[in-house]
Amino acid sequence: MLPLQTRREISPRLRHLKRLSAATLSALLGATLLGACADDGGSGSAAGDSGGEGKTTVSVGVFGVFGYKQAGLYDEYERNHPDIRIKENATERNEDYYPALLNHLAAGSGLNDIQAVEVDNVNEMATLQADRLTDLKSAPGVRESDFLDWKWDQAKTKDGKVIGLGTDIGPMGVCYRKDHFKKAGLPTDRDKVGKLWAGDWEKYVETGERFMDKAPKGVSFMDGASGLYNASVSGYERKNYAPGGKLIYKKSQAVEESWDLAMRAVKGKTTARLKQFDTQWDQAYSNGAFATVVCPPWMLGYIKEKSGTKGADKWDVAPAPKPANWGGSFLSVPAKAKNRDEAVKLAAWLTAPEQQEKLFKKQASFPSSTKALESTGVRGARHAYFDNAPIGRIFSDAALEVPKAVLGPKDQIIKQYITDIGILQVEQQGKSPGQGWDAAVKKIDDAVED
Amino acid sequence: MTLSRTERARAGGPVATTEVKAPPQGPRPSRRHRWDARWSPYAFITPFFVFFAAFGLFPLIYTGWASLHRVSLHNPTEMEWSGLHNYTRLLEDEFFWNALGNTFTIGVLSTVPQLLMALGLAHLLHARLRGSAFFRVALLTPYATSVAAATLVFAMLYGRDYGMVNWALELVGVGPVDWEGGSWSSQFAVSSIVIWRWTGYNALIYLAAMQAIPDDLYESAALDGASAWQRFVHVTVPSLRPTILFTVVVSTIGATQLFGEPLLFGGSQTGGGSHQYQTLGLYLYEQGWFSFHLGRAAAVAWAMFLILIVVGLVYWLIARRLSKSH
């Protein structure tokens, strides 16, 4: 009854005005809301279309830090192309970035003109999303011979289209602590260390067993068995898929041998039982709790940051037993990109050898361009934190030998369940290798089933 | 009804109510005015319903629709009808039952101590004490902390190798516990984050309700010789019953949807190597955004919704019986 009483006190005219304005307001609110909803599909704020004054704004969608901005490459491109503006939209984690990208591709809106794609997703994109992406194979300024052949092939579709241009790569080495090696009676010189396990990951595990016999207290040989599994399995040409696209991980030699190696490492107690990129893994760096970790070039900065001054002058890098790749990305141009032609030009320029070389110097992104790899700037590079290790030589030697692996759309899921379910159950929860393997297979079957 | 009566009164018809008088000798209100008076109340409430329809009802129904289809995140717009397949699948899905069980145990482990502690804290704060405003604000600070920040700190505290909890345990001679790796220990750890974040919030709700209890009830109870504990049990708690029911319902809903804490605690959608703390929310996320099976994820979402409806009905029945018995 209260509303009636108050209403009586207000003069009819005022009341009318008030009510009218309130009605207008609510109608407006409703309309804006509906408008906002309807508009969402069409314009997509992420993809700015024009930068005013007749300039074209090319938007670049990336995850994490690609370093183009930091290395001044956008500025340089804008200087050389006065009618172009570049806008980068970064999402921190690929786990968030990739599903959103799939959504935008399916809807055909909200897309950036250039979209970065992680190597773990690139085959899935080439298999399932090829129609929604631009073929960059013969785009102006793109030369196949500039790129490492295995990198170029990763973004190739069945019918020969190339849906992504390679940016960085992750050829693996082994980072090791010289102080721990010395205490355990192992050589510390990087060439000799490399010879300890050259050619076979099994020798790496054997070295671990030798290390553990005389290991300093509280120090394990490696961080966790998952890093070893990943490094080993990536060195084979066929791991989870046969060339025709058939799923063969249950019987493949690569998976079986790598799994057995990981199990042997766990059984011999050579691992610190850590999960990579976990908080505890970070803490273990600063506590020096393990002596080796399989490391692509992009991990060097991470190791330096987490080990800090306590770990200075202690780390070094040696070649891995077998060359293999872990990580790296591509630049793609959606077929529905607003400024497709300009985007293709920019993507070609950003991935050209000269730019890859600049990016390596400023941001330490390891180039996927053979020409850049051979340049003195890259090949002669050393890393001060890792006792001036010739990282340019070590990693580019590995890069040139990385096998042309058969990839498949579910590689990432398979890898993650084998390591985060299978290996983790054995390594951290004391289950038997058989139990761990069965649990991983069950989960993978469930995930890949339609 | 009242409105239409007013309307007639103003339009010069017979005055059926004494509450509102027609304006004396005012000009006859225009048609527009009448139209306005009749419809503007609807306009006032429209925004809510528009918002609700757009962000509440539509997603709910669309999720239900999607759950009857085979949908991949690769092609969310292409849905292939699969009937109840996604639901029958859930019945045989050990990961779903595992997640349901975990959600239940974590829910009980977090909700029960949380509400009991909240009640106790509210009771303490209800007593006149110095600096009560400070304590009330202090109670609410965990609630104001972001889930991510709180969970990351807790994950460090519960660390196996360098965690503070294990360090303290070792001081008293108990061996280190692999909090994340064990199933009860990890569920306890996740529950403790929930407890930490929500106890203060519930305590404030209880406190507000306590302050509405008339003092004479306590006085007469005291005159009858009731001890402080008896007054708490026989005066405070019964008076708080509707509030307690409210917090139980809200906490249950929160527990069913638990997501951020278990996700960030182990940093993975699997909820531990053996899914030992994978909740329904986390399982939904894994199916939809890691395996890209949106249809399955939608079915999990609807299963959660139906479970909540059943739980709500059970609470309602309990509440009805309780109020009858008193």
Image: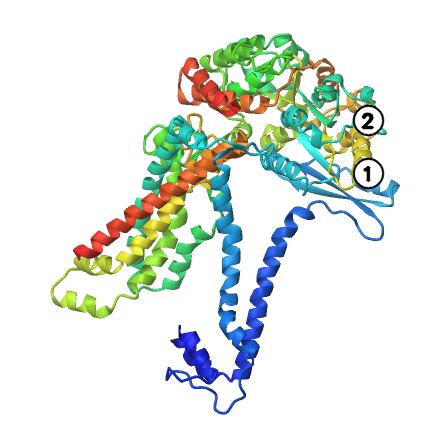
Residue under the image location 51 percent in, 18 percent down: A225
Examine the rendered structure and indicate whether residue A75 appears above or below residue B222.
above
Q: Which residue is mark 2?
A: A353
Amino acid type assigned to the residue bearing label 2 in the image: Pro
Sequence-wise first label, 2 or 1: 1
Q: Which mark is residue A205?
A: none
Front-lying residue, A316 or B312: B312
Q: Quadrant of the N terminus of chain B?
A: bottom left
Alpha-carbon neighbours of circle 2 within 10 Å: few (<14), some, or many (≥20)?
Answer: many
Residue under the image location 72 percent in, 35 percent down: A334
Amino acid type assigned to the residue bearing label 1 in the image: Glu
Q: Which residue is mark 1?
A: A342
Q: CA distance from mark 2 to mark 1?
A: 19 Å
| Residue A169 falls left or right of residue A379 | left
Secondary element type, mark 2 = helix
Front-lying residue, A127 or B188: A127
In the rendered image, the residue lying farthest to the bottom is B25
| Residue A25 falls left or right of residue A113 | left
User: Looking at the rendering, which quadrant does residue A142 occupy?
Assistant: top right
Task: Identify the subunit bearing mark 1.
Answer: A
Q: Quadrant of the C terminus of chain B?
A: bottom left
| Residue A446 falls left or right of residue A198 | left
Point out residue A63 in the picture as x, y percentages from the top left corner: 65, 36
Alpha-carbon neighbours of circle 1 within 10 Å: few (<14), some, or many (≥20)?
Answer: some
